[in-house]
Amino acid sequence: MNTILRLEHIQKYYGNEGNLTKAIQDISFSVEAGEFLGIMGASGSGKTTLLNCISTIDTVSAGHIFLEGTDITEIRQSSLARFRRENLGFVFQDFNLLDTLTISENIALALAINKVPAGSVESRVLDMAGKLNISDILDKYPYQVSGGQKQRCACARAMINNPKLLLADEPTGALDSHSSQMLLSTMQSINEQLGATILMVTHDAFSASYASRILFLQDGEIFMELRKGDDSRSAFFDKILNVLTMIGGGQSHVC
Ligand SMILES: Nc1ncnc2c1ncn2[C@@H]1O[C@H](COP(=O)(O)OP(=O)(O)OP(=O)(O)O)[C@@H](O)[C@H]1O
Ligand SMILES: [Mg+2]
């Protein structure tokens, strides 16, 4: 097993004495290379805070986070932007594509920011577009393509620099069920075929059923872990629903 990410006793507090929110109480876990990890839990349980600490968008109050052995809680503020560019990929809920750039340019921008030599940009964009089945729309603008194609473009942009981790916070949150399913299938193929390690926060049991393991948070702590193992996706989905019922009295209460 090749551990890519290790969290050791992470705590995150907001506010100050007298008005302290313990968003993360004490969380430790490891992620192996190639895992697709889901993070679930009720609203306010600390999911986004946890993801923001891992992505270095937020700073931890205590504890350490190691990405391939490097303690990322020790990275200086001035080096964080570069660290994120070189090591992390993000899939945002609204995709954040730039409307004035073509699909191809949107993907290439991520390479340009990382100072990839101009000569290799085109071939890398074509290669990734082929893997995500968007080769035929590269010259179109975001408003000229479907929602599913926009998602695949966003995934291509997130993956083009071969990130060590792909991070997604409620990536299907703004999508209808058909588009959600397409995005999840794309993330699944990124995981299985490109070997990407994915961390996905979701409140939705169907989305979570695409993960290979799920951590359930409650009040800033890990309440339970579920592994898909050899289960079918529908059997895993049922197990997830059972845990959600246990945590919050039914799926509708868990968001
Ligand atoms: N910037 C902040 N300042 C103060 N408190 C915060 C801040 N961000 C989050 N919190 C608090 O930390 C706790 C965890 O919030 P977090 O956003 O991580 O929850 P979540 O599990 O992502 O919830 P949701 O499902 O609603 O997105 C909550 O009590 C929240 O109010
Ligand atoms: Mg959240």
Image (cartoon, rainbow, N blue to C red):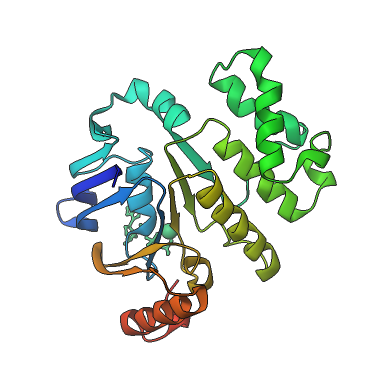
Q: Position of residue 62 (x, y in %)?
A: 16, 44
Q: Tell me where residue 22 appears, x and y as whole percent.
A: 22, 58
The x, y position of residue 162, in whole percent, is: 50, 33
Residue 125 sits above or below residue 244 on the image? above
Q: Residue at x 53, y 72 (%)?
A: 206
As drawn, 126 above or below 212: above
The quadrant of the rendered image in which ligand 2 is seen is bottom left
Residue in view at x 35 percent, y 79 percent: 243
Q: Is residue 99 left or right of residue 58?
A: right
Quarter of the image for residue 245 reads bottom left
Q: Quadrant of the C terminus?
A: bottom left
Q: Position of residue 56 (x, y in %)?
A: 35, 37
Place residue 63 in its image quadrant: top left
Snapshot quadrant of residue 57: top left
Residue at 40% of width from left, 80% of height from top? 239
Residue 212 vs residue 80, the one in the foreground? 212
Question: Residue drawn at (54%, 43%), measured in percent from left and top?
Answer: 194
Q: Quick check: 216 left or right of 122? A: left
**Left or right: 32 as drawn, with respect to 152:** left
75 displayed left or right of 8: right
